[in-house]
Amino acid sequence: MSPPPANLILAANAGSSSLKISLYQRNHAAVSSPDPSSPPEHSSITLLLTSSITNLSAPPASFSFSFAPAAPHRGADAKKEKVGVVHDHTGACAHFLQYMEREAGIEKRRVKYVCHRVVHGGDYFEPVVVDNERYHHIEKLSDLAPLHNGGALAVMKACLEALPHAASVAYFDTSFHRTIPPHIASYAIDQEVALDRGLKKYGFHGLSYAYILGAVCHYIQKDVSQTNLIVMHLGSGASMCAIAAGRSLDTTMGLTPLSGLPGATRSGTVDPSLVFHYTNRAGHMSHRREVEAQVHVTLAEEILNRQAGWKALTGTADFAEVVQGMRRWEEMFGKDEAAQSNEGLQDMSGWTTDEKYKMAFELFVDRIVGAVGAYFVRLGGRVDALVFSGGVGEKSADLRQAVVQKVRCLGFEMDYAKNAGVSSVQGSVVDVGASAEDGKRVLVCRTDEQFEMAKECAVADKFWK
Ligand SMILES: Nc1ncnc2c1ncn2[C@@H]1O[C@H](COP(=O)(O)OP(=O)(O)O)[C@@H](O)[C@H]1O
Ligand SMILES: CC(=O)OP(=O)(O)O
Ligand SMILES: [Mg+2]
């Protein structure tokens, strides 16, 4: 009997706090240049299993593993457990590969490609098969994505060692934003220095935005090239994107994933001078030992990337806890009184933890709403849908409700029952708006960066000759 074909694609998404891995089988029907708005259940690939290791930045990490309902071969049962021994992306990858082979009974040699989400691609736009030179190019860019590229490189290294038959292909978050026009992507600084050092807005979460664009266009039955969206990817790292006629027009992250909205441990945009008043050692190199890659960051970057965000404001990097604390506070004092009580309070030192959660929640809503307004104007008010995604955007009904209430003046209306019931609705896109009219839709999209990469890999003829 001949061995089973090597037609599996593993897609790895190293986020700042997580490693998400999905395994797909490439189907014979895979075609190149598919319609970008074709359904997410695209016929080029079949999902076999999904796995994630989350809370890498707020240990203990949680491991989950389950077979897809449509998977032709099923092995071990779904699993969910805390894994105290996993502290980083290398450990997370090893844990997954061991589980895939030993417990799920999937032979490693059947994996032909491993797709890796790489957050910063610099001037690489097209996906690249990783060799020594490209690995070092990505490593050099790690300084511009200190929470990310290191994790992706660690996963690449682990896969190259553990799966020697499989080629690793890097897919870049930055690619989607190559369409941002120069007057938006440029900073108002000396352009010779900017050009020489590549100092411009790159933008991130691009694989997620590409997936969301395809899924939403399919859902609303509109051609990609005719579609304008305001998309929020709200996870441990949070960003927003204005999509005009199917292309990225602007996004809130910039040269690095630090600017724009705050996140789990990131400050988001601050006055650039702030950090020199925060510490007089801002320009010194950080002493933090990076075990996963050669990353050189200053103390300033360390503070703003790892010692800020929800973690700094409240003590937890987990936004679910922030939401719970905010609710406790509102249940105690009521929404209106809570809003008033924050008004004159500038000194947070005497605040209870729940007051801090409430303030962090409102701060996030404030920054999101500000960007919705800016992008609504950028798109000339012609917006097909406001889309929530990412761990927070997909799971927090409270956050979605708070945002939509504040942007009602732009015509967006929420159906509260639909908003509360998102988790019980199947599919990649869920409508939570009160109107299905053009321009007033409010949607939730379960983004899937792994799917986006695997689909691209399956339809790239050159990979399968
Ligand atoms: N029910 C929930 N309510 C609010 N936030 C949640 C909920 N569930 C998960 N989150 C948050 O989602 C974030 C992770 O988002 P995700 O996009 O999965 O991560 P990453 O940025 O690492 O890819 C974490 O901050 C987590 O606390
Ligand atoms: C770019 C970025 O912040 O990614 P993530 O949200 O996965 O950390
Ligand atoms: Mg992510």
Image (cartoon, grey):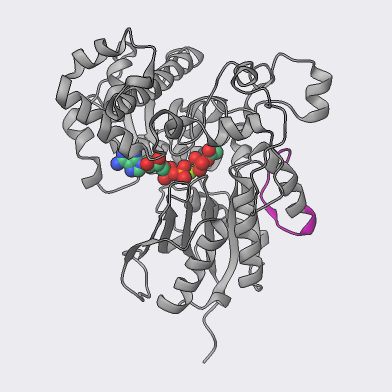
Quarter of the picture holding the C terminus: bottom right
Q: Position of residue 150 (x, y in %)?
A: 64, 49
Quadrant housing residue 73: bottom left
Q: Which residues are magenta?
A: 122-133
Report if residue 131 lies within the magenta region: yes
Q: Position of residue 98 (x, y in %)?
A: 49, 73
The answer to whether 328 appears left or right of 80 in the picture is left
The answer to whether 55 appears left or right of 108 in the picture is left
Q: Position of residue 269 (x, y in %)?
A: 55, 22
- Secondary structure of the magenta portion, mostly? loop
In this view of the protein, which residue sits in the foreground, 201 or 150? 150
Image point (68%, 27%), residue name: 281
Residue 429 appears anywhere in the view: no
In this view of the protein, which residue sits in the foreground, 459 or 15? 15
Quadrant housing residue 433: top left
Quadrant housing residue 435: top left
Image point (16%, 19%), residue name: 334
Image point (52%, 44%), residue name: 16
Outermost residue to the front:
350
* Residue 32, placed above or below residue 422: below
Number of marks in the image?
0
Report if residue 22 lies within the magenta region: no
In this view of the protein, which residue sits in the foreground, 221 or 253? 253
* Residue 264, placed above or below residue 356: below
The answer to whether 126 appears left or right of 369 in the picture is right
Q: Position of residue 400 (x, y in %)?
A: 30, 29
Outermost residue to the bottom:
1
Residue 217 appears anywhere in the view: yes
The answer to whether 329 appears left or right of 65 in the picture is left
* Residue 294, placed above or below residue 333: below
